[in-house]
Image (cartoon, grey):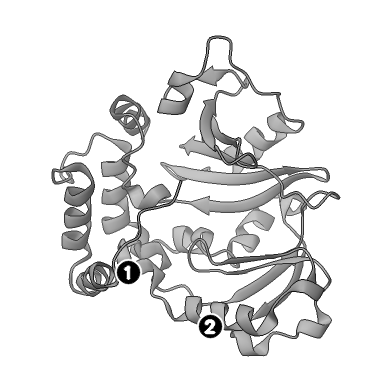
């Protein structure tokens, strides 16, 4: 399914508005998504409560900013005693022009540290179009990622390009990522995507025993008795998410379960920019009550 593209004019409008008033930008984007303004004085849903935190706390909270930074979060993970979950760091650069391609291994993962979607997964350096990759990184690096949705935790991040170890399977497949929804230091559930390889991705929620939770559309529409194989390392992954989420009212912790064990992905404080209209209304209220 292709995502609906946002026009350049619309994107430019919201970016400019974000510099003037993140609160107004947030209200208008919420209105566009849900047909009403968010209740930021007495929020009830997860979306509304995250938006309130985003506007009033995240922009000046140094720990949130550190954990939203894909480079600086490594120190936080180390301090949590979970350094074994970190992918091996190969190199760090300030600009695409500094990248020493000859010194990089045949396979690696490269990404900007200040947003999401700015990733290069290289499975074969021999087949990588380096000039095109440099141009893509340069374009991404100029984007004010924080501004479109006023995600203030990203605003003052010092931009870095990080290169990490490739953690795909020996057959070239990418590891499945598991998204843990954590409230006050406890991972309540995990979201898993199934069927991506076949072109029909569906998202399912599971509890800590890996039993299906029918709290989103795909999970509710699953047939009676539906289940997925319990992945190896799941219990350790839940415990890792618990530890990393301590001290935060909400954070989504993304982890990979690889042949080498649990590997850290990222910590996301504003999933879907806190404008998730695919979440069931009753689930949005349930998650909101847990904050």
Quadrant in the rendering for residue 18: bottom left
State the residue in front, 96 or 20: 96
100 versus 278 height, above or below: below
**Residue at 73% of width from left, 74% of height from top?**
128
Q: For the view shown, which residue lies furthest in the top direction?
A: 224
Q: Which residue is mark 2?
A: 138
Quadrant in the rendering for residue 26: bottom left
- Label 2 Cα crowd, 10 Å radius (few <14 / some 14-19 / many 20+): some
Q: Is residue 156 visible to the viewer in this orientation of the structure?
A: yes
Label placed on residue 244? none
Label placed on residue 147? 1
State the residue in front, 85 or 226: 226
State the residue in front, 133 or 92: 133
State the residue in front, 5 or 142: 5
- Label 1 Cα crowd, 10 Å radius (few <14 / some 14-19 / many 20+): many
Location of residue 112 in the rendering, given as x and y in whole percent from the top left corner: 56, 71
Q: Are marks 1 and 2 in contact (CB under 8 Å)?
A: no
Left or right: where 180 falls relative to 229: left
Q: Is residue 187 visible to the viewer in this orientation of the structure?
A: no
- Considering the numbered disc 1 on the image, is that residue within a helix, a strand or a loop? helix
Q: Which quadrant would the C terminus be assigned to in this image?
A: top left
Q: Nearer the viewer, mark 1 or mark 2?
A: 2
Q: CA distance from mark 1 to mark 2?
A: 18 Å
- Considering the numbered disc 2 on the image, is that residue within a helix, a strand or a loop? helix
Q: Earlier in the sequence, mark 1 or mark 2?
A: 2
**Residue at 71% of width from left, 46% of height from top?**
175
Number of marks drawn: 2
Left or right: where 29 falls relative to 241: left
**Residue at 51% of width from left, 33% of height from top?**
203
């Amino acid at each position: 399914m292709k995502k609906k593209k946002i026009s350049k004019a619309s994107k430019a409008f919201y970016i400019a508005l974000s510099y003037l008033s993140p609160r107004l930008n947030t209200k208008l984007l919420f209105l566009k998504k849900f047909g009403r303004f968010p209740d930021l004085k007495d929020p009830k849903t997860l979306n509304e409560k995250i938006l309130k935190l985003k506007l009033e706390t995240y922009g000046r909270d140094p720990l949130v900013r550190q954990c939203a930074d894909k480079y600086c979060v490594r120190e936080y993970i180390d301090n949590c005693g979970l350094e074994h979950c970190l992918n091996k760091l190969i190199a760090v650069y300030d600009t695409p022009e500094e990248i020493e391609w000859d010194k990089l291994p045949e396979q690696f993962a490269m990404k900007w540290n200040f947003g999401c979607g700015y990733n290069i997964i290289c499975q074969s350096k021999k087949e990588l179009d380096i000039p095109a990759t440099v141009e893509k990184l340069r374009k991404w690096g100029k984007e004010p990622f924080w501004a479109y949705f006023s995600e203030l935790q990203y605003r003052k991040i010092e931009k870095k390009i990080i290169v990490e170890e490739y953690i795909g399977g020996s057959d070239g497949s990418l590891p499945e990522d598991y998204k843990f929804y954590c409230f006050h230091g406890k991972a309540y559930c995990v979201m898993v995507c199934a069927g991506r390889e076949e072109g029909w991705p569906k998202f399912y929620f599971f509890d800590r025993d890996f039993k299906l939770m029918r709290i989103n559309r795909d999970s509710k529409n699953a047939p009676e008795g539906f289940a997925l194989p319990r992945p190896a390392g799941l219990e350790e992954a839940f415990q890792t998410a618990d530890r990393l989420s301590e001290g935060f009212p909400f954070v989504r912790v993304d982890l990979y379960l690889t042949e080498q064990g649990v590997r850290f992905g990222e910590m996301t404080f504003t999933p879907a920019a806190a404008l998730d209209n695919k979440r069931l209304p009753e689930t949005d209220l349930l998650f909101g009550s847990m904050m």
